[in-house]
Image (cartoon, grey):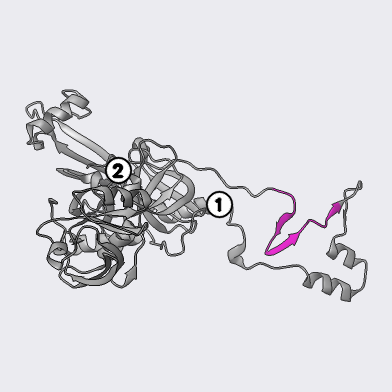
Amino acid sequence: MRISPKQLGLGGILVLVGVGVGWTGHTYIQQADFVFGNSGQVQNDPLQSAQLQSPTAIQTAQENVTTLPASALPIEANFIASAVDRVGPSVVRIDASRSLSSLNDPFERRLFERFFGEDGESQRPLNPQLPERLEQGTGSGFILSADGKLMTNAHVIEGADKVEVTLKDGRTFTGEVVGADQVTDVAVIKIDANDLPSAPLGTTDDLSPGQWAIAIGNPLGLDNTVTAGIISALDRSSTQVGITNKRVQFIQTDAAINPGNSGGPLLNASGEVIGMNTAIRANAQGLGFAIPIETAKRISDQLFETGKVQHPYLGIQMEDLNEEMRDRINQNEDIDVTISADQGVVIVRVMPGTPAEAAGLKRGDLITKVGGNAVENITDVQSQVDKGDIGKELEVSIIRAGQPRNISIKPTALPDILP
């Protein structure tokens, strides 16, 4: 399944307004006791009242004013501009193109011409003796290192014959696609340049819904566009997002996504990259999704090192169990199992010739732990499997016919074509 290019849109600015709260430097003052008289002067202010009394009363009133740590204070008003100043120079535009002649499959060529016309949205070459047409697309990316290593989405450069990278300062380079991983939608590019500004990478460990999210990219060809919103949710599975052939737990943001933002960075309020903008829900508004930076960086490191990524594979099809699913399974004669539990992760199919079959996993097995870690849903299982090593034993704890069992499995590399 191919993912279309994406974008990020502008969220609102959160403003704290209301009676009873005020900020004065590093000092928080509860104003609920402040009463304004007809004269406009503040009455019952503990500090002001103390000034009319003794020095001891003044000191006591000052001690009663609570001082908050810096981390609890409001973010500076121009923090978005500061974040953009820090990261903006490292964000690039990626123009990918391929000749229509690269569509060797006649059906694929006809499908393209059906939706885009005989000439499509392509451009004819300047040389009229060259009849091939070009399919072109634009996305975003960001610089990982000063020597020209870049990151973007795999779908941005998919099938490209040529990739051009344009920096914020206007310089353009021909990019070499070092590798792409369709499973996580991460790709890496190398350009021949030095002393480039690199994006500072952050972490999602302390990320929580409601925090600021800032995006920089090139939506609809509008270079260096800055948008802002908040983190809406964490750990959205590929299935929830609607990209079932990916292995990612996405960050959800309320920022809108447009074509051209794919591959661009999602930042926190400090101007650190916490994700790579990737997808939207076609049937929704204000729901954008980004790959967590830890996942993107882990995949990019492997791609730069070996040019490819191998994902651990067991060979099972799973379902999150609930009462309805339990009843459907129990009534399915093809599965021929009886399950009493009403929550957990149940195996509904074991693919032939896979590590799961060789280890003895069966339909109806209820998975409780993977690698010694408890799992509650499919996302948990997949996450623990991805942490395992290919060819190294991975312990899977199950319940079969009401009895607990531990089964050791040696994952293999995820095949290009699944059975």
Frontmost of labels 2 and 1 is 2
| Residue 185 on the magenta span | no
Rendered location of residue 44, percent (x, y): 87, 59
Query: Which quarter of the picture shows residue 8?
Result: top left
Left or right for 159, reference 321:
left
User: Of helix, strand and loop, which one carries label 1?
Assistant: loop
Which numbered tag is attached to residue 139?
2
Closer-to-camera residue (289/29)? 289
Residue 177 to residue 135: above or below = below
Left or right for 166, reference 110:
right
Three-letter amino acid code of the residue under disc 2: Gly
| Residue 27 on the magenta span | yes
Residue at x-position 58% and y-position 56%: 76
Residue at x-position 83% and y-position 74%: 60
Left or right for 150, reference 222:
left
Which numbered tag is attached to residue 78?
1
User: Of helix, strand and loop, which one carries label 2?
Assistant: strand
Query: The magenta stretch spans which residues?
Result: 18-35
Residue at x-position 14% and y-position 43%: 161
| Among numbered discs 2 and 1, the one appearing first in the sequence | 1
Cα separation, mark 2 vs mark 1, equals: 27 Å
Rendered location of residue 382, percent (x, y): 28, 60
> In which quadrant will I find the N terminus?
top left
